[in-house]
Image (cartoon, rainbow, N blue to C red):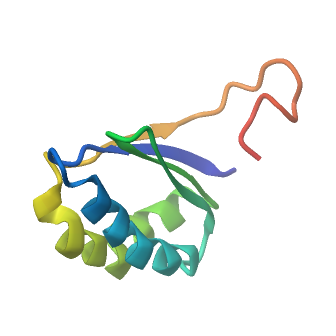
Amino acid sequence: MSVVVVATLTPRDGQLQKVLDALAVSVPLVHQEPGCELYAPHTDGKLVVMVERWESQEALDVHSAGDALKTFGELAGPSLAGPPVVIVLENVPLGDPTKGTIQ
């Protein structure tokens, strides 16, 4: 069963573009990682929210210790107000099975 993750990144004031630039480097690396099913950054202009889906907890664990996140940390670390807030979620399939879960 897939593992869904939502990670929120808070850039320092005026540093959003630097965080997005760091993601532009690291996201393609993550997309190549085994078990990555979805890794998609979103922003509201202040925060960056990563929506992720991993093939398994093991794949997520490998990602969490991998080079792509190290690269991101090196590039974006000084531009972040603090560590990412990472939430691993379990699906609650209600309603339409197509619309009620992240496919």
Nearest the viewer among 17 and 32 is 17
Could you say which quadrant of the image residue 44 lies in?
A: top left
Q: Residue at (15%, 47%) from the top-left corner?
A: 12
Q: Residue at (48%, 61%) from the top-left corner?
A: 60
| Count of all numbered marks drawn on residues in the image | 0
Nearest the viewer among 4 and 22 is 22
Position of residue 31 in the picture relative to residue 100 (left or right): left
- Residue 35 is situated, as x and y percent measured from the top left of the image, at 61, 70
Could you say which quadrant of the image residue 23 lies in?
A: bottom left
Nearest the viewer among 13 and 57 is 13
- Residue 3 is situated, as x and y percent measured from the top left of the image, at 58, 49
Residue that protrudes farthest toward the front in the picture: 14
Nearest the viewer among 1 and 18 is 18
- Residue 90 is situated, as x and y percent measured from the top left of the image, at 58, 34
- Residue 53 is situated, as x and y percent measured from the top left of the image, at 60, 54
Q: Residue at (87%, 30%) from the top-left corner?
A: 97
Position of residue 103 in the picture relative to residue 37 (left or right): right
Position of residue 30 in the picture relative to residue 65 (left or right): right
Could you say which quadrant of the image residue 70 lies in?
A: bottom left
Q: Residue at (28%, 53%) from the top-left corner?
A: 16
Q: Is residue 24 above or below residue 61?
A: below
Q: Is residue 92 above or below residue 88?
A: above
